[in-house]
Image (cartoon, helix red, strand yellow):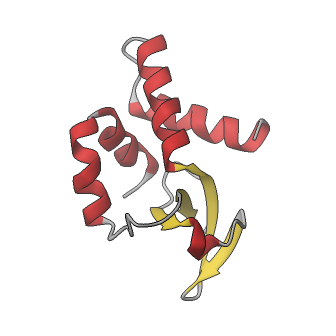
Amino acid sequence: MDLVNFIDYLINLGKIAVMLSELNVNNESEALIVCFKDSIDLNSEISIFGIEETEGDLIFEKEGNKFVELFPLDMVQEMVEEYVNTYKGISSYEIGQRLIDYRINDA
């Protein structure tokens, strides 16, 4: 699932549990971290890891794959909700671009 599809799940809050199940996310983690596989890009695959797996690193490897942290899941959810409420009619693509821009330039 890429970032735009991931955002679609977040906009429809009822789908979050389904998404977490599809991604085999460990819900028992202290914090869930949203990561890009390989690089920060709208088309990169999104994965969610428990913070215990990332050890707090912004870039880490797992099973031979490189992952780059976007933000913790709760922060992404809040940001998406804020964009949807502030900019009526904003697309998932535009939200994805804003999240990436924020991650690269401000975070």
What residue appears at the point 58 percent right and 66 percent down from the top-left corner? 51
Answer whether residue 23 is visible to the viewer in this image: yes
- In the figure, 62 relative to 55: above or below? below
In the visual, does 16 lie left or right of 56?
Answer: left
Percent position (x, y) of residue 2? 42, 54
What residue appears at the point 28 percent right and 37 percent down from the top-left corner? 13
Which quadrant is home to the N terminus? Answer: bottom left
Taking depth in this image into account, of 96 and 107 the one nearest to the observer is 107
Percent position (x, y) of residue 86? 48, 12
Percent position (x, y) of residue 3? 45, 48
Which quadrant is home to the C terminus? Answer: top right
Percent position (x, y) of residue 47? 46, 64
For residue 53, what is the image quadrant?
bottom right
In the visual, does 54 lie left or right of 28?
Answer: right
For residue 66, what is the image quadrant?
bottom right
Answer whether residue 40 is visible to the viewer in this image: no
What residue appears at the point 62 percent right and 41 percent down from the top-left corner? 100
Taking depth in this image into account, of 16 and 39 the one nearest to the observer is 16
- In the figure, 96 relative to 56: above or below? above
- In the figure, 67 relative to 98: above or below? below
